[in-house]
Image: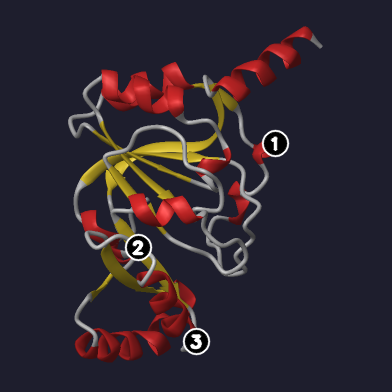
Amino acid sequence: MALEKDQKKFLDMGKMLPVMEEFYTIQGEGRHTGKPAYFVRIGGCDVGCHWCDVKESWNPDLHPVKSVDEVVINAAKYPAKAVVITGGEPSMYNLDYLTSQFIAHGIRLYIETSGAYRLTGHWHWICLSPKKTAPPQAEVYDIADELKVIVHNLSDLKWAEEHAIKVNSNCRLFLQPEWSKREDIMPIIVNYVMDNPKWNISLQTHKYLKIP
């Protein structure tokens, strides 16, 4: 019982987190596609996208609670001093300690979030990927460096524009085909971006390359 109490305390402090997986790879999506980075996938998400390709991340109880210090040491072993925090939905947790420790090790920090929760911590790059099931917090639009909208059907283009008018003027805009619909939706996205050049196309290049 005491162990469980201590674990909850460290979870609340952000010194421990449920980590589904961590690995070194090449970034496959968005603005930093093609760059090496260490990925940390945090377990836990209640946003519930029906097309999510990592549904196994939703239940945090399925993933070991790990020391953030240990995760930082693991990431620091690799030559690319860049870490991507993803999920699940990482903003469900207190990320102040995590970001302070990575930054202390000279590591740049990137996060992908739906914006459904208030974002804690200090970040070098924030990718906002909004979901219809849980709208972003208003303040996330102001700090987002990148807006990445997953396009599953035609109505998602109108929905993407509704979010594009909310982000700051320096935010980069990306449309990304939902993987299972990519053959059908890609020509539509191509034509849309040519007609609306403020948008860029993001592809899940890691899936084409067959890497994590």
Q: Secondary structure at mark 1?
A: helix
Q: Amino acid at mark 2?
A: Val
Residue depicted at x 34% and y 73% = 175
**128 or 54, nearer to the observer:** 128
Q: Residues within 10 Å of mark 2 (few under 14, many from 20)?
A: many
Q: Number of marks in the image?
A: 3
**Which residue corresponds to mark 1?**
61
Residue 208, image x, y percentages: 31, 66
Give me the C-alpha separation between circle 3 and circle 1.
35 Å
First-in-chain label (3 vs 1): 1
Q: Quadrant of the N terminus?
A: top right
When the figure is inspected, residue 197 is found, relative to residue 25, above or below; the finding is: below
User: In the image, is 85 to the left or to the right of 15?
Assistant: left
| Whether residue 206 is visible | no
Tell me the mark number nearer the camera, choosing from 3 and 2.
2
First-in-chain label (2 vs 1): 1
* Label placed on residue 155: 3
User: In the image, is 103 to the left or to the right of 89?
Assistant: left
**Which residue corresponds to mark 2?**
167
Q: Amino acid at mark 1?
A: Asp
Location of residue 100 by image quarter: top left
* Label placed on residue 76: none
When the figure is inspected, residue 210 is found, relative to residue 111, above or below; the finding is: below
